[in-house]
Amino acid sequence: MITRLAKADIRIGMFVEAVEGAELSFGKRRFLLESDGDLDAIQASTAEFVLINTAFGADTAKARIAAAKDGLKKSLSPEEARVKASEVVARSTRILKAELIAIVTGGAFDKTKIAPVIDEIVEADRTTSSLFFEVSRLKHKDETTFQHSLAVGTLMGKLGDALEMDKETVELLVLSGLIHDVGKLTIPQSILQKQGPLTQAERKLIQMHPKRGHQILKQYAAIPEEALDICLHHHEVLDGSGYPSRLSGSKIGPLVRVSTVCDVFEALTSARPYKHGWPVADALTWMFDRDHLFDRKLVTRLGGVI
């Protein structure tokens, strides 16, 4: 399988199909990466990404995940671990941003390009994933939608794991979290980042993003039906006052309920250009007290993994 990695993630033992950049910066193609000299030359090149063939070389996901874990665990101070986590989040945000923009603009959906981000989240230990989530909540104005999606994907994976769902379902939850807000990319930033009260027309426009996202994603056969359902219904709440379909009670499936709890919690606790984030305890209490909106069991379980 061909996998596209940021050049910082490549390791000795991988089979390089191509280095994405000018040939003059690195001219070799299709070779087993065995020497530190070649590795250093790729890192020094102008390329940003490298195509790896897992059929002929090391397992990219395992090698990268092991390196990430080692980098976060080996004699690192809390501040150094946070810096490492910030690097992972920045890299993951770049990948996610590129792929979501490609989807919105009619490009092909290739899950293998997002797979490294999913693997990073699914395979991270509790401390590491908590750092990923914490860092991704500190959003930059131009990256809000992408980092929100990254944080929600991380939360959904953590919650799915805590609920003892199988690995395939946890990976599905992470993927769904990463792409659930793609419809927001069709909404003007001036509205998404507005600091004052929204007009009725602006609010209606924002509430169209689940349908817009669903319409975009359903064009891609590779996207699972469950992910489409989460995209369309992640703003539904138990009493039927949500949108866009005003579903209630048992009509809201278990995976959608996971997405709703994670999405709302992330939104409440995140710093945005127009608001301060709530303390974690305050957000959980607010949600727990509103069991007419949110599945209280999921809120409680989420509190145990934050």
Image: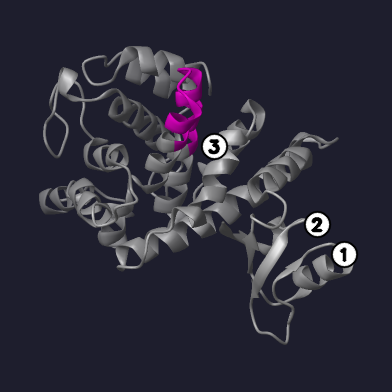
Q: In the picture, residue 62 is in which quadrant?
A: top right
Give the label on residue 259, or none. none
The amino acid beneath tag 3 is: Phe
Disc 1 versus disc 3: distance between alpha carbons? Answer: 35 Å
Q: Nearer the viewer, residue 235 or 67?
A: 67
Badge 2: residue crowd in 10 Å (few <14, some 14–19, many ≥20): some
Q: Secondary structure at mark 3?
A: helix
Read off the residue under disc 3: 133
Give the label on residue 12, or none. 2
In magenta, the rendered stretch is 154-171
The amino acid beneath tag 1 is: Ser
Q: Secondary structure at mark 1?
A: loop
Viewed as shown, does residue 160 lie left or right of 228? right
Residue 131 at what x, y percent from top left?
Answer: 62, 36
Give the label on residue 35, or none. 1
Instruction: Please report the residue visible at 22 percent of the width from the left and 42 percent of the height from the top.
Output: 232
Residue 167 at what x, y percent from top left?
Answer: 50, 29
Residue 79 in sight here: no
Marks 1 and 3, the one that precedes in the sequence: 1
Instruction: Please report the residue visible at 70 percent of the width from the left and 76 percent of the height from the top.
Output: 29
Q: Secondary structure at mark 2?
A: loop
Marks 2 and 1, the one that precedes in the sequence: 2
The amino acid beneath tag 2 is: Ile
Disc 2 versus disc 1: distance between alpha carbons? Answer: 7 Å
* Circles 2 and 1 in contact, beta carbons < 8 Å: yes
Residue 11 at what x, y percent from top left?
Answer: 76, 56
